[in-house]
Image: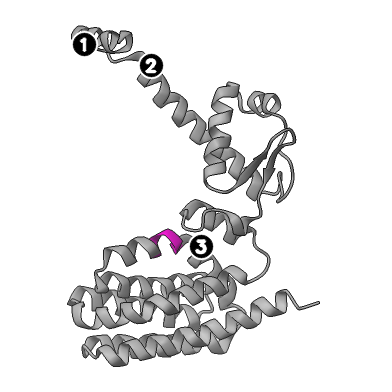
Amino acid sequence: MTDQKTTRSAAASGAAPASRLAAVRRSGLAEQVAEQLLEDVVAGVYPPESRLPPEPVLAERAGVSRLTLREAIKELRQRGVVRVQQGRGTFVNPPETWAQFDSTLLNARAATEQGYELAHELTELRRIVERGIADLAAIRRSDEDLGRMEDAVSRMKAAWASRDLDEFSSADVDFHDALLRAAGNTFAMTLFHSVDPALRRVRRRTVEDSAELSERAIDYHTKIMNAVRRKSRKSAAQLMDDHLRETEEFTAQLAAGANPAG
């Protein structure tokens, strides 16, 4: 009751409740601290399974109160980055246990992973979903959508000719993004936009591992674009499935080679 009276009094006087503003400020600061800790984890300052320094030490380093630090740790716990073991401390979890569709965390995992498990899993996901995306794109595409695809394919060809692998991998992902836009499914767009930074990073890693697969990607993209232009749903979907099946098999070989059975 007292809080309600205080709130009404503050509203009548034109002043915002100070406690709410303080909570917003503290929350924003906690998010900043959480991001700083995540950067340290990604940089290897706190590797997987290592224990973070005690709360007073971390709070002092960050220049924040212990309450703010706890809120930052709570956020990282909710995102799966760390776990708190009563009486032992706070430990860093392996990246594969982090929140999988948190764009920041997924990109961080892509940056730290030495093998190709993530590339393979993302390719499996893409094959499951993008066949349907190609199907929808073939009946929903606009001239503007076709223009985006043509631009992406042209950039891929030019980048491959000059062996600009950064531009090639970027144009590759942009082609698939153009198809996604053409399909016009908001849930699919949300899903793929959450993995986009990680997808671009792993695509850049894999593109230099197989010249033949990269050249075939240009051919597949051209054929898929033409099928979409003709509004041939069956052809577009089948070509996409064939394209990503090859990529899936390739990333499976990379993953197996990086982690041979022992």
Span shown in magenta? 192-196
Q: Residue at x 35, y 70 (%)?
A: 177
The one nearer the camera, 187 or 175, is 187
Rendered view: 189 above or below 255: above
Q: Which residue is drawn at 36% across and 76% down?
A: 152
Residue wearing tag 1? 14
Query: Magenta part mainly helix, strand or loop?
Result: helix
Which disc is residue 19 wearing?
2
Separation of disc 3 and disc 2 at Cα? 39 Å
Inter-mark Cα distance, 1 to 3 = 47 Å
- On whether residue 169 falls in the magenta region, the answer is no
Residue 54 falls in image quadrant: top right
Looking at the picture, how far across and down is residue 121, in whole percent?
54, 72
Q: Residue at x 66, y 23 (%)?
A: 60
> Disc 1 versus disc 2: distance between alpha carbons?
15 Å
Q: Position of 239 compared to 260: left or right?
A: left
Q: Position of residue 158 (x, y in %)?
A: 43, 80
